[in-house]
Image (cartoon, helix red, strand yellow):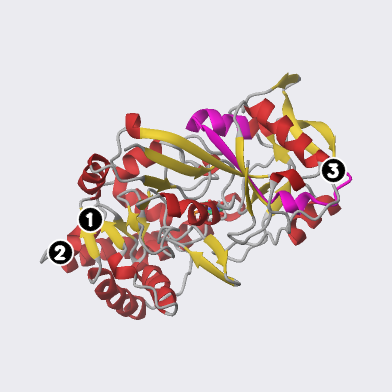
């Protein structure tokens, strides 16, 4: 059986968690393939809002197995908090959660290093979530990291100590004057390791190979968004993993020819949290309205998200890089009430009009070219069928489908599971 893949096409926060939760009933395994607790996947049902950081978004369903892949970086302390939250809902997560031995661990000193590195960058800071993501992936590619499977070895604490000592010297080098109590952080870390060790560790590539042979249905869940990809994003203002489709192959051990559908999730407008270029960003009342109505605050850090019009140049790029086969449009309801909607269809770039994403999209290089469309005033949040959509929303969807040459199969009209309209 083939593997389907779901990922974000913008700068993250597209609503992947909600859609994974909606789709999980069709799958046997939900497998997260990259990122770590920098993610905040929000799910809402029965009047309760849940935020997951590392645990795949299928965990609230009865049957599906939730797999944390080798491409993910795990902070045991945050992971334990997530598990404690699930326990409050009497969720038997132990039988539904498996973790790759090859996933890397975020150590307390990785988090401090992240803070020290950001502080040393001054105005050029990335706007990192400071969860230790960058330093952990650096240790992974630098071949120094500690993996989940190491916890089964007798000398893992020695390895831990060596790496933490090295980190302390690096933290001193930054001279960022960050205060921390390592002993306290380590107590919390080793306590959380005990919880982690009570879970099932697997060789996930073999597990997924066998699952495919048995005809199981697998959904690979991405985190962050394509424009935050370490290779294809707006470098250096990106995260440290491959958030694009290829990341699912390396982050799970799934062969490229086994991937069938690629579900690309995007918001009907654009948001970004943290630093970095954002050509269609709004600094006016329209941007403020999107932020307020869309409740655009980070699920992990609480930071206000920057808002702007939909950028089809960037979106097309993401569709192409990922080989998206189906699009899912989120937060259409937030655009209700705008008289006119703008969609960026090209950039003015160095005196020319271009329709592809150039190397440099800093504001001094790029000015968006907009197509204007009539907005709608109807409240979409109570709608439950596409036949109820106003004409202007259908026009908006048709325009995007034509431009992106890809069907939009789901339109989300609110945060709840039930506010999901299939087309
Ligand atoms: P880091 O991955 O925490 O180092 O953050 C690097 C950049 O990616 C920053 O601009 C963050 O705001 C952004 N980022 C990381 N994770 C997410 C996410 O899940 N949603 C949106 N932005 C994110």
Q: Secondary structure at mark 1?
A: loop
Q: Is mark 2 within 8 Å of ligand 1?
A: no
Mark 3 secondary-structure assignment: loop
Relative to 25, residue 234 above or below:
above
Q: Is residue 147 magenta?
A: no
Q: Could you say where residue 89 lies in the image, as x and y percent from the top left?
A: 44, 77
- Give the CA separation, mark 2 to mark 1: 9 Å
Between 405 and 361, which is closer to the camera in this rendering? 405
**Callout 2–callout 3 Cβ contact below 8 Å:** no
Label 2: element kind: helix
Name, please, the residue furthest toward the left: 154
Q: Residue at x 47, y 56 (%)?
A: 117
Q: From the viewer's perspective, is the residue at label 1 or at label 3 nearer?
A: 3
Q: Nearer the viewer, mark 2 or mark 3?
A: 3
Distance in Å between CA atoms under marks 1 and 3: 50 Å
Per the image, is 321 magenta?
Answer: yes
Work out whether mark 1 precedes mark 3 in sequence or the reverse, and give the earlier one: 1
- Ligand 1: does it lie within 8 Å of the C-beta at label 1? no
Q: Is residue 330 visible?
A: yes
- Looking at the rendering, the stretch of residues picked out in magenta corresponds to 315-341
| Left or right of residue 256, residue 309 in this image | right
* Residue 82 lies in quadrant: bottom left
Residue placed under numbered mark 2 in the picture: 152
In this picture, is 191 found above or below 293? below
Evaluate whether residue 284 shows in this view. Answer: no
**Residue beneath label 1, please?**
101
The residue tagged 3 is 375
Q: CA distance from mark 2 to mark 3?
A: 58 Å
Q: Position of residue 110 (x, y in %)?
A: 37, 61
Q: How many marks?
A: 3
């Amino acid at each position: 059986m083939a593997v389907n893949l779901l990922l974000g096409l913008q700068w993250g926060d597209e609503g992947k968690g909600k859609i994974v939760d909606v789709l999980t009933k069709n799958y046997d395994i939900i497998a997260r393939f990259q990122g770590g607790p920098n993610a905040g996947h929000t799910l809402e049902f029965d009047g309760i809002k849940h935020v997951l950081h590392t645990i795949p978004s299928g965990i609230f369903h009865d049957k599906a197995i939730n797999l944390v892949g080798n491409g993910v970086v795990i902070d045991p302390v945050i992971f334990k908090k997530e598990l404690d939250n699930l326990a409050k809902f009497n969720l038997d997560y132990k039988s539904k959660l498996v973790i790759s031995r090859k996933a890397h661990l975020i150590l307390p000193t990785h988090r401090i290093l992240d803070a020290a590195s950001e502080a040393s960058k001054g105005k050029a800071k990335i706007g990192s979530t400071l969860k230790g993501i960058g330093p952990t992936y650096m240790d992974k590619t630098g071949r120094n990291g500690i993996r989940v499977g190491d916890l089964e070895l007798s000398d893992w604490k020695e390895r831990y100590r060596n790496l933490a000592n090295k980190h302390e010297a690096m933290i001193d080098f930054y001279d960022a004057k960050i205060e921390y109590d390592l002993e306290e952080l380590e107590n919390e870390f080793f306590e959380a390791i005990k919880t982690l060790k009570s879970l099932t560790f697997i060789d996930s590539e073999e597990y997924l190979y066998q699952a495919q042979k048995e005809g199981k249905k697998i959904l690979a869940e991405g985190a962050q968004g394509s424009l935050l990809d370490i290779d294809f994003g707006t470098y250096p203002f990106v995260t440290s993993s491959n958030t694009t489709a290829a990341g699912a192959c390396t982050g799970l051990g799934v062969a490229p020819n086994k991937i069938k559908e690629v579900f690309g999730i995007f918001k009907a407008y654009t948001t970004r949290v943290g630093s970095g270029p954002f050509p269609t960003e709004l600094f006016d009342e329209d941007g403020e309205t999107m932020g307020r109505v869309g409740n655009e605050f980070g699920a992990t850090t609480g930071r206000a998200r920057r808002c702007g019009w939909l950028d089809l140049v960037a979106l097309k790029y993401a569709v192409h890089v990922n080989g998206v086969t189906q699009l899912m449009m989120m937060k259409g309801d937030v655009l209700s009430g705008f008289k006119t909607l703008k969609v960026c269809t090209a950039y003015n770039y160095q005196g020319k009009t271009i329709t592809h994403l150039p190397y440099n999209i800093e504001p001094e290089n790029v000015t968006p070219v907009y197509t204007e469309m009539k907005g709608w005033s109807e409240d979409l949040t109570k709608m439950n069928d596409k036949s109820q959509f106003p004409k202007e929303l259908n026009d908006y969807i048709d325009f995007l489908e034509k431009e992106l040459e890809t069907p939009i199969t789901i339109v989300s009209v609110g945060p709840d599971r039930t506010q999901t309209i299939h087309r």
